[in-house]
Structure formats: structure tokens, C-alpha cells
Image: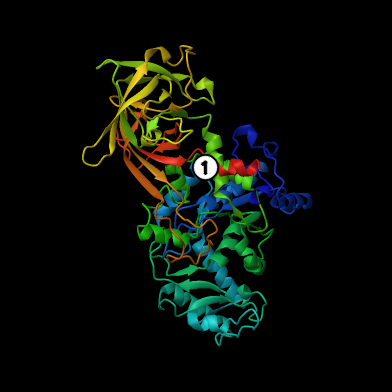
Amino acid sequence: MAHDNEKLDVNPKKGDESSSDSYQSTNFIQNIINNDQEEGVYGNRVHTRFPPEPNGYLHIGHAKSICLNFGLAAQYGGLCNLRFDDTNPIKEDVEYVDSIKRDVKWLGFDWEDREYYASDYFEDLYQYAVQLIKDGKAYVCDLSPEEMKAYRGSFTEPGKESPYRNRSIEENLDLFQRMRNGEFKEGSRVLRAKIDMASPNLNMRDPALYRIAHVEHHRTGDAWCIYPMYDYAHPISDAMEKITHSICTLEFEDHRPLYDWPLKELNFEAPPKQIEFAKLNLTNTIMGKRYLRKLVEDNYVDGWDDPRMPTISGLRRRGYTPESIRKFCDLIGISKSNSKVDIGLLEHCIREDLKTKVSTIMAVLKPLKVVITNYPEGQFEMLDAENNPENPEMGSRQIPFSREIYIEQEDFMEEPPKKFFRLAPGQEVRLKNAYFIKCEEVVKDEETGEIIELRCTYDPETKSGTGFTGRKVKGTLHWVSAEHAVKSEVRLYDYLVTDKDEEDTEENTEQTVKLNPNSIEILSECYIEPSVAAADPGTRYQFLRHGYFSVDTKYSKPGAPVFNRIVNLKSSWDKAKNQ
């Protein structure tokens, strides 16, 4: 299981706690760094970076990388940059830049004054490309994309050299300058590295370094019409920022020779070292960025921050805490081989984080009206209720009790089976923090036969907290006062993907996975105790018997709160780990 992997404490520390003593890491990346320090490769420096592409919102897999890169830097008393790899303006947007910065800060990490962009280096990257041309290491190629693919060969067949591979240095310099000047249309030419068309690594078969794109860039405007390829811009950007360890996911392992190539050819001193680790794969979750974009653009979900999405903004809106996500990243560890993590572990982390932090209140999601016929009309009283049974230090609150209350529909059965200990005709139950009540009469709709009201009596001697021991009941129900409860909308979320083992690949750009048609249930007639009336968006609660909930930050309004279910109370992970 992935949770048995080598671990890194990814919780951010501040002040003097940011020393290596604050972290207990045993992962293979640390071993590499330790060896480098013993050999004095980087003069005992550790400088990492988190390099997102601003073409979408970050997801839980990116959280693993954020925690790893910032965590390692803190562990070794080093630095971590935030650098946007904004080399593809076709899909990039300032909205994504802003969302990424917001997510990293929310997770608890700070890049201080080290916010960089690959576009900061466009002129440098261009001049480095000119140097490669002068050194006979790069050439302008006129093959079409389809021809380049055909010339590339296969895993079993070597590639064929481009007919433009042996252009003179002077011609290549002229053509590259004219590419920059905008003289050629998109797709007509690229700048390629001159490496080895027979290399067993297909990435080394004269890969493209620059392409033509007459697209306005979100930072540089229309200053450029040629843009560097990721595999070229990334290692040079790392080197220019004095990065020591360039940590990326396992799919870039085959690209490592290409990462090293420009650094060697351009004679960078103490070049950064690329290290690969396994990305996060989560059950019931698709994290391919192209697929997530499709879900948003085709309105399958309510934006990138839809609480069903695996994005950090979606998890935040749903009610997850940064502490729970950092703990999750710590528990899954760092591995050199791909595996899949049960989403139950993520849910376990938020339950564990919230159970002693939030108030436990009563909410009736599918209400059934109860009239207590022997309770005085127009009267109400305030009853004491503890805020959190797991944490007595959170104290207590008072809740109103009156003649008319709501209970859950499922807590009443007209013809109950044996061992049904909730409310039934002639049966007595305790109302949480209140009194015993007994069902005397069932009122039904004359046309439909639907149960619309129960008439009950209460025993005033059974008031909670009085020490009453005259008799016992087996059932205790939650409830709210009908007169005082806050009417609310509650949204119950399920997994967006139904198949627990659905393959997560970047090729999932069509509707190839099984979306759950019941991934959201909206309940508009819910009643919650009045303590939530003034709750700020983002406030979290435990609804007794229902789960953990958060006030929605997008649709809640004063007097009309909307609650998102973060997670239910049942934990399959707790059961599995105890077996």
C-alpha cells in the first residue's frame, strides 16, 4: 500500500522550528540530498522549486508535490521557489496564476520574494538557443508535425535524419531570427536540437526546442511569436535560479537525459539534478488536467472549485483543512513506483483533524414534524448541550426547545421491525439533551397517505441532566425546534467517479470514465439549530449522526446558509487499518 512508503513530515514550520530537527524524513530523495551534501556538490545548499503550468487549477496530486518541495527546503534550511512554467500561451491564463498562488498559500507555504516565471527568461532562453545553433547543436527544421513524427522512428526502429539537419550555421541563425520576427506561419518551422536520431531514447531524437505560435502571452503580450518547449525551458530556468534538486513526477524519468543535455551543452556549473517520484493516484478520482478542464468547460461540474472536484480549491470549498491535506501527503509517503491510494485515507485525515475542533450540532435534513401535545403552547425553554463530546474544553451552548419540533423522517416507522429503537406508535425515545417523548398519533395526508405529522407527549421528569433514572429507553434522536431552526440548503456529495479502479490518464479527454449520476443530492428543506444563523462562510460543524459539514463559500447568504457535506461519519479506512 502507498501509505507504507517512505515518509516526509510536510507540515510547514515557522521561525526557529524551520530547522532540520523539525522533520523526520526517511525517503529516497533525502538520501540523494544527503549524499550530495557529503560530497559538497552544491556547497551544502538545498534549493527546490514548485513549477506549475498555469493552464488549470491545482489538484490534490499537486498538493503532494507542493508539500514535498517546500517541506524538503524547510527541512534542510534551504529555499523553495514558486515558478510558473508559462511557455504555452494557448492554454494559459492569469486566472490560473492567481488560483495557484492562492492554493499554495492556503496549504501553508510561503515562497517569500521568490515568485518567478519562465517568461522572465524568454530573452535568455532565446540567446541560449542562438548559442546552441552557433555550436552546431541546433537547427531549423521545415518538416511538418506529421513528417517529424514519421521521421522519429519507433522503439524498435531508429529515426531518420531531417533533410534540413545539415543546414549551415549561418542559415539556421538567419531562419531562427526570422522565426522570431514573425515571418513564418505556425507549424511551418521549429528549432530542433541536433542530438541522435538513432538514440534508444526517443526523447533524444532531435527534439523540438522552439515552436511558432502567433498567440498573445498573458505576461509578455505580443512581444514573442516563438515559444520554448517545456523540456528546453525547464532545465535552463532551474539552472538560472540556482536550483539544486529538480523534483518531478515519474513520467519525466525518460526525459532526464533531455533535461541534462542543454545544461551540459551550455556549460552550466553545478547543474541541478532531476529526481523523479511517483505521482499521486487516488481511487474514485480522475486528475488528468485535460479531463478536469473538460468537466469544467462542458459544465459537468460547477467550475474548478466544485466540491466534487479533486482540485485544491474544490477541497477547500467543500470544507477540507490545509492541516488534513498536509497530513494526508505525509501519510502516503514518497515512492519510486506508481501505486494507487484509497480515497478513504484522505477522508480519514479530515475526520481526524475536525473531530476535536468543531462544534457538534443538531441538523434535520429530511424533516418530519412532531407536535408535543402536552407541552404548553407559546412556551419554549433553553437546554444545555455540549459543543464537542470529544473536547470538553469547547464548553456548551444553549438550544431552544418548544412544542413543535422536527425529527428525521427515517427516525420514525409506523410498523417497525424488531430492534428498531427509534420512534414508533406507542414507543418512547429520548430527545438528545431534552426529554423522553412517546408517539400517540400519526397524522397522514388524506389524499396521498403520506405521514405529515406525529403527535406525541413528553414526560417533564425525564429532562436531560436531572439525573432521572426511573426508566430507560434504547433510542436517542436528534431534533430541532421548528420555531427557532434555521432553514437551510444542504448538499450531500458522493464520489464524482463511480469506478474505484478507473484508470487515470491524460488521455481521458472524452467522456470515457463513469461519472456518478448521483454525485450530488441537494436538500432544500433542512432545519438546523439556530447557533448556525450567523456562521461565516467556511465555518465547519459536525452534524450529529450525519457527518462533517461546511458553510459554502460561494452560494451561502446571510439568513440563507448553504452547507456542503465534507465527509460522512463512517470510515472504511478506520475499519481497514484495524483489521
Disc 1 target residue = 107
Instruction: Identify whether 303 is placed above or below 514.
Output: above
Q: Is residue 106 left or right of residue 529?
A: right
The part of the image, by quadrant, that contains residue 198 is bottom right
The part of the image, by quadrant, that contains residue 429 is top left
The part of the image, by quadrant, that contains residue 529 is top left
Of residue 5 and residue 54, the one placed in the foreground of this image is 5
Q: Is residue 56 left or right of residue 40?
A: left
Give coordinates of residue 106: x percent, y percent: 49, 41
Q: Identify the residue at the far left of this view.
A: 447
Specify whether residue 467 is in view.
Answer: yes
Specify whether residue 171 is in view.
Answer: no
Viewport quadrant of the C terminus: top right
Of residue 533 and residue 63, the one placed in the foreground of this image is 533
Q: Secondary structure at mark 1?
A: helix
Q: Which three-letter amino acid code belongs to the residue tagged 1? A: Leu
Residue at position x 50%, y 37% in the image: 569
Q: Crowding near pointer 1: few (<14 within 10 Å), some, many (20+)?
A: many
Residue at position x 57%, y 59% in the image: 237
Residue at position x 41%, y 35% in the image: 416
Give coordinates of residue 152: x percent, y percent: 58, 81
Residue at position x 43%, y 43% in the image: 318
Q: Is residue 59 left or right of residue 517?
A: right
Of residue 564 and residue 304, the one placed in the foreground of this image is 564
